[in-house]
Structure formats: structure tokens, C-alpha cells
Image: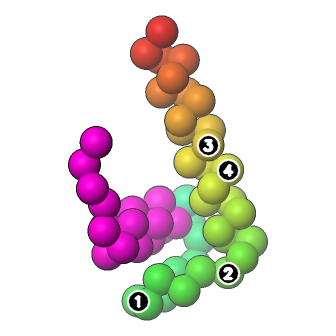
Amino acid sequence: MKQTNKDDIGHIFKNIAQRRGLSVDGSFKVRQSDLDEIWKIIENDKEESNEQAE
């Protein structure tokens, strides 16, 4: 598995948030409600990709 640094994670979160229309500023500060939403999206995406892999 590829090592992911903090900058990569910040960009991933920012990209997901922007795609979902959530508010993110340049320093990747995100409201807690947005973070909760992002984690739900990530968990759903994991479940979907696991189902597709089967």
C-alpha cells in the first residue's frame, strides 16, 4: 500500500468536500459537520468498492 503523507490527505479531503459542495478554505479547515459527512462518504465508498470487487 502506498504511503500517504498529510498533504495528500488534505488534498483528498478538499477534493471530496468540493465535489460534495461542502465548504473548505485554503488551509483545509473544515467544520466538524463537514468532517462527519466526509467520513460517511468515505465509509460508503469503501463498502461500494468492496461490493463491486466481489
Which residue position is annotated with label 1?
26
Kind of element beneath mark 1: loop
Q: Earlier in the sequence, mark 3 or mark 1?
A: 1
Q: Which residues are magenta?
A: 1-19
Relative to 44, say whether 50 is above or below: above
> Could you tell me what secondary structure mostly forms the magenta stretch?
helix
Picture residue at 47% right of the left edge, 83% below the top? 28
Which amino acid type corresponds to the residue marked 3 in the rendered image?
Glu
Q: Amino acid at mark 2?
A: Arg
- Image height of 43 relative to 9, above or below: above
* Residue type at the position of mark 1: Gly
The answer to the question of whether label 4 and label 1 lie on touching residues, with beta carbons closer than 8 A, is no
Q: CA distance from mark 3 to mark 4?
A: 5 Å
The quarter of the image holding the N terminus is: top left
Q: Dot 2 corresponds to which residue?
A: 31
Q: Which residue is mark 3?
A: 43
Upstream in sequence: badge 4 or badge 1: 1
In space, the residues marked 2 and 1 are separated at their CA atoms by 13 Å
